[in-house]
């Protein structure tokens, strides 16, 4: 009889482990594409000062509020905790499709960017041949969080 609780404990532990693995972000097909990591670092002001020039067109307009120091905004979100490439955007995913509808390209890498007090999702298009990023979108909340759909 004493073996039954041990067996059940092992079963529930295995169930919890498999659930947490399923909740992990999807692996990027072959990692982030050209320029997207550099763009993400620039947006969180971890890149060189001249990195602002990599954003062109609509991406420049979206990036500008992020690249300049704003003590109030920086205090509210807290220090950068982590950032990771979450995968690639897809029209077939309802979270991504909502963001991609207003973008000039559907080819975007997804980054999960966590600050001490808030989490964002960055959608960044790969750099063109000239090294410029032309499509960018940022949403509050983690990637594929149901709160994004509200």
Image: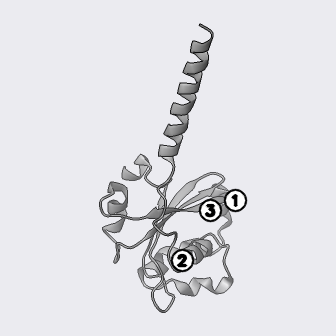
| Residue placed under numbered mark 3 in the picture | 73
**x and y, in percent, of residue 150 in the image:** 37, 49
Q: Nearer the viewer, mark 3 or mark 1?
A: 1
**Label 3 residue SS:** helix
Residue found 33% across the figure and 57% down from its top: 93
Give residue 64's mark.
2
Depth order, front residue of 94/140: 94
Q: Which residue: 43% across, 53% down? A: 144
CA distance for labels 2 and 3: 14 Å
Task: Estimate how packed mark 2 is, as few (under 14), some (14 to 19) or many (20 or more) residues with alpha carbons within 10 Å.
Answer: few
Q: Are marks 1 and 2 in contact (CB under 8 Å)?
A: no
Q: Which residue is mark 1?
A: 79
Q: Residue 5, image x and y in percent? A: 59, 15
In x, y percent, where is residue 65? 55, 72
> Image height check: is 19 above or below 128?
above
| Mark whose residue sits in front, 1 or 2 | 1
Camera-nearest residue between 88 and 60: 88
Label 1's element? loop
CB of mark 2 within 8 Å of CB of mark 3?
Answer: no
The answer to whether 79 appears left or right of 124 in the picture is right
Residue 23 located left or right of residue 76: left
Q: Residue furthest top?
A: 1
Determine the residue positioned at 57% across, 20% down. Answer: 7
Q: In this orientation, which residue lies closer to the viewer: 50 or 95?
A: 95
In the rendered picture of this protein, how many numbered marks are placed on residues? Answer: 3
* Screen quadrant of the N terminus: top right
Q: Which one is earlier in the sequence, the residue at label 1 or at label 2? A: 2
Q: Residues within 10 Å of mark 1 (few under 14, many from 20)?
A: some
Tell which of 30 and 43 is nearer to you. 30
Q: Crowdedness of circle 3 by 10 Å Cα count: few (<14), some, many (20+)?
A: few
């Amino acid at each position: 009889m004493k073996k039954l609780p041990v067996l059940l404990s092992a079963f529930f532990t295995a169930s919890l482990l498999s659930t947490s693995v399923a909740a992990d972000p999807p692996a990027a097909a072959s990692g982030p594409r050209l320029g997207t990591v550099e763009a993400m670092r620039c947006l969180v002001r971890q890149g060189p000062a001249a990195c602002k020039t990599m954003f062109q067109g609509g991406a420049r307009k979206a990036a500008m509020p992020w690249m300049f120091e704003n003590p109030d905004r920086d205090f509210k979100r807290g220090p950068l905790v982590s950032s990771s490439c979450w995968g690639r955007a897809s029209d077939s995913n309802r979270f991504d499709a909502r963001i991609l509808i207003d973008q000039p390209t559907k080819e975007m890498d997804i980054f999960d960017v966590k600050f001490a007090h808030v989490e964002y999702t960055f959608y960044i298009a790969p750099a063109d041949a000239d090294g410029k990023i032309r499509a960018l979108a940022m949403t509050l909340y983690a990637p594929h969080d149901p709160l994004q759909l509200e």
